[in-house]
Amino acid sequence: MNKKKDNHWMLLAPIYLFTILFVALPILYMFLLSFLSRAQVWGVDFTFTLDNYKKILEPLYLDTFVQSLKLALVSTVLVALIGYPYGFFMARMNDRWKKRMMLLIMIPFWTSGLIRLYGWIIVFRSNGVLDKILQGMGLTEEPLKLLYSYPAVVVGMIYVLLPFMILSVYSSAEKLDDTLVEAARDLGASPFKAFWTVSFKLTLPGLLSGVVLSFIPSMGLFFIADILGGNKIVLVGSVIQEQVTKGRNQPFAAALSAVLMILTSLMIRLYRKITGTAKLENIV
Amino acid sequence: MKTKKWPFVYVGVITAITYIPILLTVVYSFNESKISSVWGGFSLKWYVELFRDRDIGEALANSLILAVSSCILAVVIGTTGALGMHRKKSRINDGVAYLSMLPIMIPEIILGMVFLSVFSFMGLPFGMVTLVIAHTTFCIPYIYSMVKARLAGMDPALEEAALDLGASPVRVFFDVTLPLILPAILSGCVLAFAMSFDDVVISIFVTGPTVNTLPVKIYTKMKTGVTPEINALATVMLAATIFILFVAHLLGRRKS
Amino acid sequence: MKKLFTLILALSLTAGILTGCGNADTKKESGLSGELNLYTWDGMFPQEILRGFEEETGVRINYSNFSYDEEMLAKLEETKGGDYDFVIADDYILELVIKEGLAQKLDTAKLETYDNLNPVYMSQFYDPDNGYTIPYGAGIPLIVYDPALTDVEITGYADLWNPALKDNVAITANYRVINGITLKTMGESFNTEDLDTIKAAGDKLIELAPNIRVIEDNNTQDLLISGEVAAAFLYTSQVSTALQARDDLKVVYPEEGLGFGIMAGFIPSDAPNAEAAYAFIDYINRPENAAKCFEYIGYYCTNKAAEAFLSEESKRMIVLPEGASEGEIIQNVSQEAEDLHAQIWNRFKAACD
């Protein structure tokens, strides 16, 4: 037993060390920064202030949080609806197809994300691919203004987030034992009921980690809104970017980031509470 | 079990849609015109440009080294961490696990900025080392959470049985635990690799004068505009990946 | 999948070896050797020039990039003006770089090509005595419109407000520039410090919102060329690209007055290879080389001697017309004014949605 205990510390040492040194320290610095005021020319003055947080309460900035949350929620829900069946079916394929699908998911990552988004521009723009198809089918006559609209942004978000959902559902559905479902069916459960009580329950950890893994980045993916939405939806991410660069107000940007970080973890917590996953322990 | 067709159709259709922008990228890499909205006829000139550009080749190599190194480091730290925390639950462990997730909850530009200050405070020289450390911080969460989700539903009896049968803990890990969590590690790697291979903002802040990465090169064309040369690069990389996978597939088949 | 990862690893290692080969210095006999750490946006020099310099001097160029000027400033602050040898950035940030003591005083006697520079682009607010900087490219954002898509005859910024252009205008994503042209329509300066004036400009800007289709810094010319928008307010290199693609587009030098921006290079205060930087400055300012550079980046040519080497077509695009240099440069303003500009901008973007 003694040996096993030592073992624990060896397993935990790397993550403790790395996290404290390279995560905790920078984040502490970020919080410190958020209570400072900015210097005249560049950088920060080491005088304590709460102004940065007060400023966030202005309706202008509060609204960017609302916009970001809205977009993140809409995208995450849609990604879950599309990605869950995908990951689930993928796990039910035979080994050869599993490998092939894994590769198909991975290959796009070898091209730049920006380039792939520009690909969507070609699809959506006036007289672009989609317009041509719709006109060809006689559904529309005039070119639609699809690009730089909210739906175009949502498509871009789904596109970027989908792999997170698919892979996390897949890795948890992969270990699902078919005999359990068959047993349920043998006991007289309808296919739906068998799925709901057995398969869905057992793949829930995967779905949850997928939701969390896609929700978190979606709060920060402002460049999709910039590229496909024509910069017209103001998200927290773009405000922060602007404050660091043009505005040269690092402390305010740090305060916005701190609030965003806290908000994100609260949302995840709330989500866990609603879905009642206390038993499933903290997956994330 | 009967194999039904419609799951395949569903997966196929979704996959096809995700490939549309990539196919368009390939098509437009052969576009004579510099402007993406005009088709100026077939041309290979962007490929010629691409192969003359030494900086892009170097940036690509750097990005690959960076992504692979951070993935490996993140796999080691994330997997051992998930195993350790799975076996022994405590409040401190939960706290550290939560902390390790934070890098992906903070906007990149702030993370980049604080890394810049903290690394400089620690006296680390800016370059590949700082890049790998920074990228590992945001790769760990993907691997950790995937492995943790997989472990959550795993039967602890398996490991215990092996231990009871007298297997050493190391052997149990490699023979029992690892095969079970491997799909999760790989899924996590795919995402972590993608995040690292596409990171611009953090890299700009933590890199040094001699190490430039590919996404940074692509995104910093701001002043002069994204050229079709980048489409050509994407196409070459796509072709190379497919070729390598194909060869690997053939070799693998011969072996077995 | 294990195989895949082994392969990826192998691939990356080979790639590493290949660049290792590339590193083997091609030493040539010149007083110099070693490296030059060049730091600016990507795409600022043609390959020909970079490789030509390396061949001539035996100095290896490490070209690294930033996307915002402020990222560069943050890096230089942390490295105390070290690490990099030659940096090119925008005018307003140069003012800060020099104020913070991060640039070193230039010894112009070392530069054989110094007299080639065009004085029109020198002695500016950021470096009034030309002690620190060498200009490299200038820009004037202009309006370009498609007469086929709109009946409005555009002559100035104010015409962008015309209701006939509803949802048909693209603008750049730089708030000082956009707020600036709004100030111009009111007859004010880009750099006014008067908060009430800036506020009034903010209210006026909101009225522009219904006309805005896109706010975008990159590849905005594509939108004009493909007919996505009828009018666009564009950066110089984008104006040239748009006109090259479609000669039926019309360029407008807005009557309210032009905005003017200069990019310039400096040697950081603690540059490890300052000598190599001097050699590079000389190399890019030889008339024939400078001509190649400016034709490549599509910005106004800041090298007088190079104008003779430009093709007739580029001359039309990148040699400044007489009198256009009267344009006003956007400068740093007080914190309060800057904050107000940022606030106006976010309100405006929200109104566009």
Image (cartoon, helix red, strand yellow):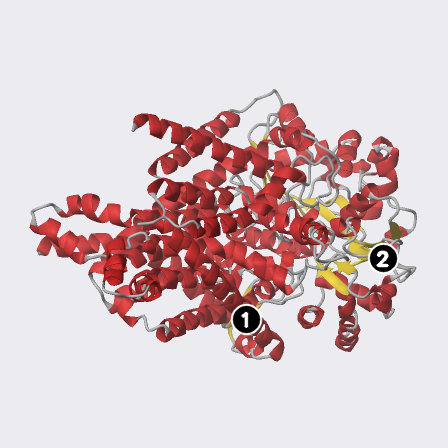
Residue C290 visible to an observer of this rendering: yes
- Looking at the rendered structure, whether the residues under marks 2 and 1 are on a common chain is answered as no
Q: In the rendering, at what x and y percent does residue A169 appear?
A: 38, 56
| Residue A245 in view of the camera | no
Q: Nearer the viewer, residue B201 or B140?
A: B140
Q: Residue at x 16, y 53 (%)?
A: B158
Question: Which quarter of the rendered picture does the N terminus of chain A lie within?
Answer: bottom left
Badge 2 amino acid: Leu
Q: Amino acid at mark 1?
A: Lys
Q: Are marks 2 and 1 in contact (CB under 8 Å)?
A: no
- The vertical placement of C255 against C137, above or below, is below
Q: Percent position (x, y) of residue A122? A: 67, 49
Q: Residue C245: image x %, image y %?
A: 81, 42
Using the image, determine if residue C183 lies above or below residue B79: below
> Disc 2 and disc 1: Cα gap in Å?
40 Å
Q: Which mark is residue A88?
A: none
In this orientation, which residue lies closer to the viewer: C343 or A21? Answer: C343
| Image: B197 above or below B32 | below
Q: Is residue C173 left or right of residue C192?
A: left
Q: Chain of mark 2?
A: C
Which residue is the site of mark 2?
A: C258
SS type, badge 2: loop
Q: Nearer the viewer, mark 2 or mark 1?
A: 1
Rendered image: mark on residue A70:
1
- Residue at 44% across, 59% down: B104
